[in-house]
Image (cartoon, rainbow, N blue to C red):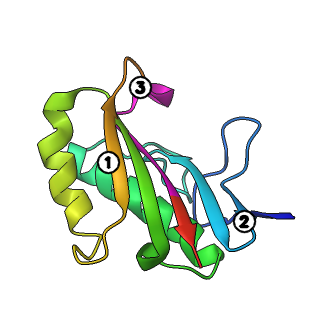
Amino acid sequence: MKKIINTENAPSPIGPYNQSVLAGDTLYISGQIAIHPKTQILVLDSLEAETRQVLENLKAVLTAAEMSLDNVVKTSIFISDMSLFGEINEIYSQYFDPNIAPARETVAVKGLPKNVNVEISAIAVR
């Protein structure tokens, strides 16, 4: 059985999908980009601001599911250019406890929605 979890504290989906789906004790979070949930405007002031907004959007979805970043077991990071990895990784590392950090992959892709630099999806377990 699956339960759809959406929140006004994260950006509305920009296509035919939900912010997240809870199946049993596992939460599958759709890729988040740096759209500010209140204004629906992209936060592209800097790569740091963009990455932080993406992670804050992830946190908002987790909170709606009564979870936290500590529940995340896997992330997938998609970036527009591998040269951005270091700065994105620096911000990412501020959000996850290194002792229980999730598994992850980081992939450079040809293009991302709305031409952003970073998108992150996650899987969390209760």
Circle 3 Cα neighbour tier, 10 Å, few/some/many (<14 / 14–19 / ≥20): few
Q: Which amino acid does label 1 sit on?
A: Glu
Residue at the image position 48 percent from the left and 76 percent from the top = 71
Whole-percent x, y for residue 7 in the image: 67, 66
- When the figure is inspected, residue 111 is found, relative to residue 105, above or below; the finding is above
> Which residue is more in the foreground, 124 or 59?
124
Mark 3 or 1, nearer chain start:
1
Q: Which residue lies furthest to the right in this view?
A: 1
C-beta proximity under 8 Å, tags 3 and 2: no
User: Can you see residue 57?
Assistant: yes
> Which residue is more in the foreground, 14 or 43?
14
Mark 1 or 2, nearer chain start:
2
How far apart are the alpha carbons under marks 1 and 2? 26 Å
Instruction: Check residue 22 in the rendering and tell me which mark sits there, or answer none.
Output: 2
Q: In this view, does 19 lie to the left or right of 34?
A: right
Whole-percent x, y for residue 105 in the image: 34, 44
Q: Does the magenta stretch include residue 26?
A: no
> Which residue is more in the foreground, 3 or 53?
3
Q: Which residue is labeled 1 in the image?
A: 50
User: Can you see residue 46?
Assistant: no
| Labels 3, 2: front one | 2
Q: Which residue is labeled 3 in the image?
A: 115
Circle 2 Cα neighbour tier, 10 Å, few/some/many (<14 / 14–19 / ≥20): some
C-beta proximity under 8 Å, tags 3 and 1: no
Whole-percent x, y for residue 115 in the image: 41, 25
Mark 3 or 2, nearer chain start:
2
Instruction: Check residue 42 in the rendering and tell me which mark sits there, or answer none.
Output: none
Whole-percent x, y for residue 9 in the image: 59, 67
How far apart are the alpha carbons under marks 3 and 1? 12 Å
Circle 1 Cα neighbour tier, 10 Å, few/some/many (<14 / 14–19 / ≥20): many
